Image (cartoon, grey):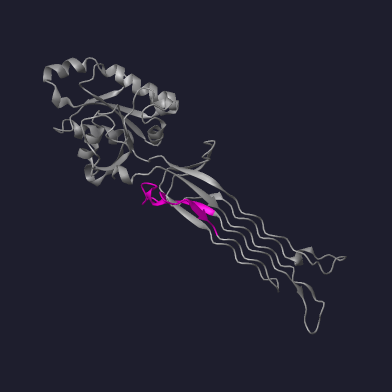
Amino acid sequence: MSNENFIDYVKIFFHSGKGGSGSAHLQRTAQDPKAGPDGGDGGKGGDVILRGNRNHWTLLHLRYTKHMIAEDGGNGSANQCFGKNGENIYVEVPLGTVVKDPETGEFLGEVTEDGQEYIIMKGGRGGQGNVHFKTPTRQTPRFAQPGEEGTEGWLALELKVLADVGLVGFPNAGKSTLISVLSNAKPKIADYPFTTLKPNLGMVAYRDYKSFVIADIPGIIQGASEGKGLGLRFLRHIERNAILLFMVPCTSESIKKEYKILLNELKSYNPELLDKKRILAITKCDLISESELKKIQKKVPADVEVLFISSLTNQNLMPLKDKIWEFLN
């Protein structure tokens, strides 16, 4: 999925339908010119509903949508005929979409399953016809209830990528190269920081026709949890991943220090992220000699599973997939 086609945030003005008005009709026939009230109820206004769709991976299809308005309910009529209910609007969204108030950031709801529906704005109720207001002392009510107004306002839709594995590392750690080798994803790859500006998803084939989804998340920098670099824009995508694959190049001045900084950024953003299963991949091992590699092996963190890999030479990529599958199951 190209960066240009990955949209993870849209802001849309939604308007649910207004309820139809009840009818104040009074029945008159040749046999009974004063038959009394027979006004029907108004129809309900249409709802605005989010619906999860596993075939969508991004909010791209909503990129240029600014307003979505549901249909109003129909008015009631004579002979106690009910007004037509307004048509609902269904907004198809990828799994992992969150609804928020764009002004306050308040969490309103989310869609995480295929076919799941979440009503973000309810349509107004239809008004009651005058038949409901007939009493022994008021035989011919000449009024009816108006329909209830619909709800309107701006809402933000945010996508938090749903993937089995999230790649976490500083810019230029080799994340995009790894996902391009392991999967069919074709991210932009270059020898400079922040080449990846949007998450990339790839399907990784495993043994016996099994597979898992891996997400290349834009690189972290120190202070990302405070909004520096790409900041919070990408950190939210990590929340949905089952496994975090930390990536530190073997050429780093201190692998332990770099790994600790990554952990601290995640902890500052959301301490619950540290409860996820973790693997540390030391990348670009084709750039160093065997003797240098042995020295590095003595300096890696002891509290995490560590693998030494090279995307260029495919070194230890199969053991890496084995370890990921083991953690997933």
From the viewer's perspective, is residue 298 above or below residue 229? above
- 138 on left or right of 170: right
Which of 112/277 is in front?
112
- 142 on left or right of 155: right
Q: Position of residue 97 (x, y in %)?
A: 44, 44
* Region of the chain picked out in magenta, as a range: 48-70
Q: Position of residue 39 (x, y in %)?
A: 72, 69
Q: Residue furthest right?
A: 137
> Quick check: is 251 in the magenta stretch?
no
- Can residue 329 be seen here? The reply is no
- 304 on left or right of 23: left
**Residue visible at 22% across and 15% down in the picture:** 298
Which of 97/152 is in front?
152
> Quick check: is 53 in the magenta stretch?
yes
Q: Residue 126: which quarter of the image?
A: bottom right
Q: Residue 307: which quarter of the image?
A: top left
From the viewer's perspective, is residue 116 above or below residue 308? below
Which of 115/328 is in front?
115
- 259 on left or right of 67: left
Q: Position of residue 306 (x, y in %)?
A: 25, 24
**Residue visible at 26% across and 16% down in the picture:** 254
- Can residue 233 be seen here? The reply is yes
Q: Residue 329: which quarter of the image?
A: top left
